[in-house]
Amino acid sequence: MGASSSSQRYSETLPPQAVELLSDNTTALYPSAAWNSYNSSDPNSDPRTTFVSIGGARIGPDGRYWLVDGGSQGVNGSTKLVGVNLTTDAVDKIFYLDNITASDSGIDDVRFSKDPEIAYLSDTAGALLVLTMTTGDGVRVLADDPSAVAWFPMIYNGTLLPGYGSSSSLSVGLDQIEVSPNGIYLYYQPCNGGLYRIKTAYLDASLTNSTLVDSMGDYAEPFSLTPSTGGSTIDGDGNIYLSDTNLLAIWKVTPEGYTTILVQDDRLVWTDLMWVTSDRKLWLPASQMRPGGNGLMADSPNNIFTYLIDAGPAAIDHV
């Protein structure tokens, strides 16, 4: 991979697309067309070796490009964490997550502990996965904890987003996650807003302490009042950036929990998969998603904007 990567999806029937952004601003399927070929109506289409529902992506401490495949409920092997070797541009490691997810799980994003052998994955059903990267073993914590579930509907551009039942509104549980540059805290929130933090020492210890699995919510700390959010990232100074789906803006949350609106632009529709570069630019992929029961897909154009900030990336997060 010589440039940048993203994911895009414009149809409920076509396969998801993980793509590489080339130097001429065109895209190519990544890491291959085969990985982007899943067809739910084809019995020969293998969900274990194709992308079913791409969510987040990050470069891990091992140098791999990790893509989160949220899969499809009831399809064994479809929910997975897929690692791509950036030297060969080939998938060389996969963690299947069926054993540590619930029937209603929606695995969406990934971040990494200061311990390079541990990863955290958000579950929009209202939980967090803690995964051992050496064995693939893991636990599901914060399940249905008040800090992990959505208590009010999401808002897009002044409108409550419709849900999937009659007269319902869209509520999405634990989704955005970030790890502080020093590795001490994991920050998390439901898509509907309300940022919490928890010490990674408790999360990491839960891999070998079943009591912690059940009591993890006792260690959660309210951190900052944040809005309906499409995505997040963190910089090397510990500032968290959140996209506001209502105001079409980007918020900055300082390490002390203070918030400011960094930029507002009507083109910033459902900004997700944000990225901080070494030249201190905040990359803002405006996914154009308009989620909800009346349509999940994106409209074009699918632009990536940049915004100059005061810090580079956190070494623990990506380079």
Image (cartoon, rainbow, N blue to C red):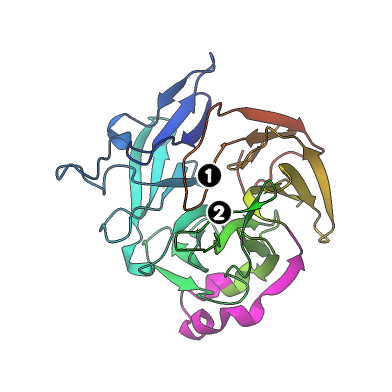
Residue 43 found in image quarter: top left
**Which percent across, then down, holds residue 200?**
62, 67
Q: What range of the chain is rendered magenta?
A: 203-226
Amino acid identity at mark 1: Arg
Instruction: Name the residue tied to disc 1.
Output: 58
Density class for disc 2 (Cα within 10 Å; few <14, some 14-19, many ≥20) is many
Q: Nearer the viewer, residue 62 or 258?
A: 258
* Alpha carbon separation for disc pair 2 and 1: 7 Å
292 relative position to 220: left or right: left
Q: Which residue occupies 69% across, 41% down? A: 313
Q: Secondary structure at mark 2?
A: strand
**Which percent across, then down, holds residue 177?**
60, 57
The answer to whether residue 113 is seen in the rendering is no
Q: As drawn, which residue projects farthest toward the left?
A: 44
Q: Pointer 2 and pointer 1: residues touching (CB < 8 Å)? A: yes
Q: Nearer the viewer, residue 275 or 195?
A: 195
**Which percent across, then down, holds residue 209?**
48, 81
Figure check: 221 above or below 78: below
Q: Which residue occupies 60% across, 27% down? A: 303
Q: Secondary structure at mark 1?
A: strand
Figure check: 170 above or below 99: above
304 relative position to 103: left or right: right
Q: Which residue occupies 58% across, 42% down? A: 273
Amino acid identity at mark 2: Arg
Residue 111: assigned label: 2
Across the whole image, how many numbered discs are drawn on residues?
2
The answer to whether residue 195 is seen in the rendering is yes
Q: As drawn, which residue projects farthest toward the front?
A: 167
Which tag, 2 or 1, sits closer to the chain's start? 1
Q: Nearer the viewer, residue 95 or 224?
A: 224
